[in-house]
Amino acid sequence: MKILVLIKQVPDTTDVKIDPETNTLKREGVASIINPFDMYAIEEALRVKERIGEGCGVVAISMGPPQAEEALKEAISMGCDSAVLLSDRKFAGSDTWATSYTLAQAIRKIGDYKVIFCGKQASDGDTAQVGPGISMHLDIPQVTYVKKIENIDIEKATLERMTEEGYDVIESPLPAVFTVVKEINEPRLPSLKGKMKAKKAEVPVWGAGDIGCEEDKIGLDGSPTRVVKVFTPPAREGGQLIEGEPDEVASELSGILKSIVLG
Amino acid sequence: MDYLLTEEQEMIRDLCRQVAEEKIKPVAAEYDEKNEFPWEIVKVMAESDIFGVYIPEEYGGMGGGVLEMAIATEQLSWGCGGISLAFAATGLGTYPILLYADDRQKSKYLPEIAAGKTLAAFCITEAEAGSDAGGIKTTAVKDGDHYILNGTKQWITNGGEAGVYTVIAMTDKSKGPRGASAFIVEKDTPGLSFGKKEDKLGIRGSATREVIFTDCRIPKENLLGKEGLGFIVAMKTFDHSRPGVAAQAVGIAQRALDEAVRYSHERRQFGNTISSFQGIQWMLADMATQIEASRALIYSAARMVDSGAKNIAKISAMSKMYASDVAMQVTTDAVQIFGGYGYMKEYPVEKLMRDAKITQIYEGTNQIQRSVIASALIKEGLSK
């Protein structure tokens, strides 16, 4: 029986710039990390494995360029049992529909899964669509924004789903897709033995042919949506700093506001 | 500096640094103030396999030695020189087992220690037996298949928290130091109790406590090595553990330098950052050079100990003495660079100065280290 966790390698978001000429992300010199929300998904997958115990393994899956292997090795160093990388030039340009189709094909091939964990969204695209998309492609239930797993056995799970005002309590049969929020846990650090294992681990790379993808459903051509334009909003102009005693500052400010409002 | 570490040693360094930055540094001031034992952090270190770095793989460890222990201690101490002691003092308590236990004893105790499920503590010091370990009054009297221990050990790091205690006690007082023996005592043994918790100047995130034996009966299988070996067990243990104290010192010193460099960029006086003043620059340069020299000495000492070389007392003592004196100097200078702010608890450097002081005192004062070094020198000189 397997618990699957889907992760994405993203640029470290503290330091991302857009090239104004091409409107694409400047990736040179930007460190790559595991999408922060996926760290919670990895942690929860490991906790579910620990709860269920014997005979349960965690498989980390990522779709991306060859260097996404690093992210999968990090997942192994945290305790995942194995990993699979989906990498093929034919996948390039996939939107969330094509991506979730491709991942679903890989999941079918892996088989024998009970839970598929995803982060609630990726920090680069921020769509939050791939997890739900996979559940539709596989025709299994989905619970998004999971903040707690109250109970889980091999048949079903009881979960808390975060909402704006509080949370819903949901019981779902398994297998199912759960996307998690950061409230669910605190991700563990890697262990030394995990790092040693990751160093030696061979991560298989699957292409479109390996997972039986229909060519017209993958990559740019298989994507029903197109990014028409990406742009950086114009930078804010610097404000005006009014200095002086509080009384003076207040009266000067009210004068400026009046002149703006009254013209 | 490139110390030509193996990939595995770099892994240990990087992971311990990650633990120090993400888990220890944010809570260090709180543990310092509350004088509490950091079980939360111990759990993190255990889950990351850090407790096993110097324990053989056959007993569940990572198979490293003194160098791996020093690398881990240095990084953890960068986060907090007190909290790191849960790890480092466990090393001190474990070395008697690593060096002198038989296979049965090793199989019984080392896997739990490697997994971080049990901490260890070394019990030698008493009220009247500090540097003069010959003054030990705790006794172990053989009684059939048991030994009965009586006496009080003082200032025991990890006391009350550790599950395994390695204890030096007198089996034959008439023989002086040759009448001392080493034993393993488990925490739940009847007759073992814990006294006063010390309120200390520094390393307040560590436990320092009396360990009291009152007709404490232990099976004779808990003897380490042979009767009469106790003093040798202690000396060999210190030869292996002193580079660890040195590493604690260099970790604290490195943190002080990092804080001082950063602050000197921020602090402005006379219209400039204080890092633009030659007086500050020269202090920083001296601090950095002394730290690098300490680290080089520690790693060399640790490698020599791990090589199985015989005469390691001198190099081990040198590393502990030099690195701890440097840590005291560097942390004092860091407080000086911070000026009035450095003296305030709101800033991190006064704690570093308090934490550094113990490294000049414990596991043999630096005066004792000089005596160890000098006696080795004289012995070498006579044999030429």
Image (cartoon, rainbow, N blue to C red):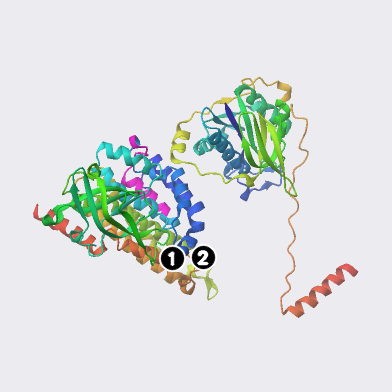
| Quarter of the figure with residue A42 | top right
Q: Which stretch is magenta? A: B58-76
Q: Chain of mark 2?
A: B
Q: Residue at x 50, y 58 (%)?
A: B27
Callout 1: 10 Å neighbours few (<14), some, many (20+)?
many
Mark earlier in primary sequence (1, 2): 2
Foreground residue, A71 or B84? B84
| Label at residue A165 | none
Residue ID for mark 2: B265
Q: Secondary structure at mark 1?
A: helix
| Quarter of the figure with residue A1 | top right
B335 in the magenta segment: no
Where is residue A55 drawn, in percent x and y?
52, 27
Residue ID for mark 1: B351
Main SS of residues in magenta: helix
Q: From the viewer's perspective, is A92 left or right of A52?
A: right
Do we see residue A130 in this rendering? no
Rendered view: B303 above or below B264: above
Q: Residue at x 48, y 34 (%)?
A: A198
Where is residue B226 drawn, in percent x and y?
17, 44
Q: Amino acid at mark 2?
A: His
Q: Amino acid at mark 1?
A: Lys
Where is residue A12 drawn, in percent x and y?
60, 46
